[in-house]
Image (cartoon, rainbow, N blue to C red):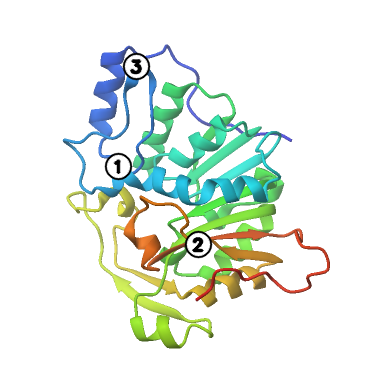
Amino acid sequence: MKHFQTSIPRARRKSKAELQAAVERLAPFHHAIDLPYGLSTYVPTASRQNRERTRMQTLLDHAWPSILDACGGSLAGKRVLDVACNCGGFSVHAARAGADYVLGIDIEPHYIEQANLVKEAVDLDNLDFQRLDLMDLDRSEHGMFDLVLFFGILYHLENPVLSLKRISAVASNVLAVDTTLMKVPIINRILDRWPMWHMRRVAAVDSNASNITTSRWRPEEFCQFSPNSRAVTSLLEYSGFADIERLKPKVSGLEKRYYNGRLATFIAVKEQRAAGNANPRLVGDP
């Protein structure tokens, strides 16, 4: 399978001082990624939110073992797509975990610049980053992927149904979704048996916004939809996934959002893992 690599060519490895200066120039980063020389993309003096330090490790602790299990225990020989990769932390982790090829995509050029700096620093030949809208994914051009990471984007989408259908078209087996859920308490407690979406109009973001590490892509007012848990599982089923599980937060030290139900992770598999089960396995729904 052709990899279609378009990222920056291999360059002379930066010295520690050069790499540190480059990281500081592009900070803050949304993911804390370990770099050579004992450096990290997490720069405390530039950090805007504590999540820049905790986001990546929290999700890995919470979900990575289940993701590997869904992939047969290993990423060896697998092609991985990281949608809305931001600065590339999860892409790097998948590449380091032995994937055959990892493609991270994002629509925001600043995040791709950050990701390419990381790629150059960690020197992984199986890793590529591209500025690309998920709606422009095409399996005839980009190929199929054994694992798709869909972290922190579902609740930002104006067209979640069309977007998931586009993702499904390039996902051959496993899709991992991490998303904020609807923040309407009465609906979460009483009406979660029905799939529902909460529409919100969110303001434009400028370069001085406190959450710039995640919302730089939104220069204009935007309409987005936050799902309840049943809406996520129903949409995944509609998009062609047969085996769907909402992960329970089983480890300590995660961000509070996982314990209070504001943030949830779903593993969806196209191939049935339980023989004879004709319906999706909706585990962990309230």
Closer to viewer: mark 1 or mark 2? 2
The secondary element bearing badge 2 is classed as loop
Q: Which residue is mark 3?
A: 37
Q: Amino acid at mark 3?
A: Tyr
Q: Earlier in the sequence, mark 1 or mark 3?
A: 3
Whole-percent x and y of residue 61?
46, 46
Horizontally, residue 81 falls left or right of residue 85, namely: right
Q: Amino acid at mark 1?
A: Arg
Mark number displayed over residue 93: none
Q: In what quadrant of the picture does the N terminus appear?
A: top right
The secondary element bearing badge 3 is classed as helix
Whole-percent x and y of residue 94?
55, 37
Q: Residues within 10 Å of mark 2 (few under 14, many from 20)?
A: some
**48 and 263: which is toward the camera:** 263
Residue 27 lies in quadrant = top left
Residue 98 lies in quadrant = top right
Residue 84 seen in render:
no
Horizontally, residue 18 falls left or right of residue 11, namely: left
Q: Which residue is mark 2?
A: 248
Seen in the picture, residue 190 relative to 149 is either above or below; the reply is below
Q: Which residue is mark 1?
A: 53
Q: Residues within 10 Å of mark 3 (few under 14, many from 20)?
A: few
Seen in the picture, residue 86 relative to 10 is either above or below; the reply is below
Q: Amino acid at mark 2?
A: Lys
Whole-percent x and y of residue 166?
62, 60
The secondary element bearing badge 1 is classed as helix
Separation of residues labelled 2 and 3 (CA atoms): 36 Å
Horizontally, residue 125 falls left or right of residue 192, namely: right
Q: Identify the residue at image location x=44%, y=59%.
A: 153
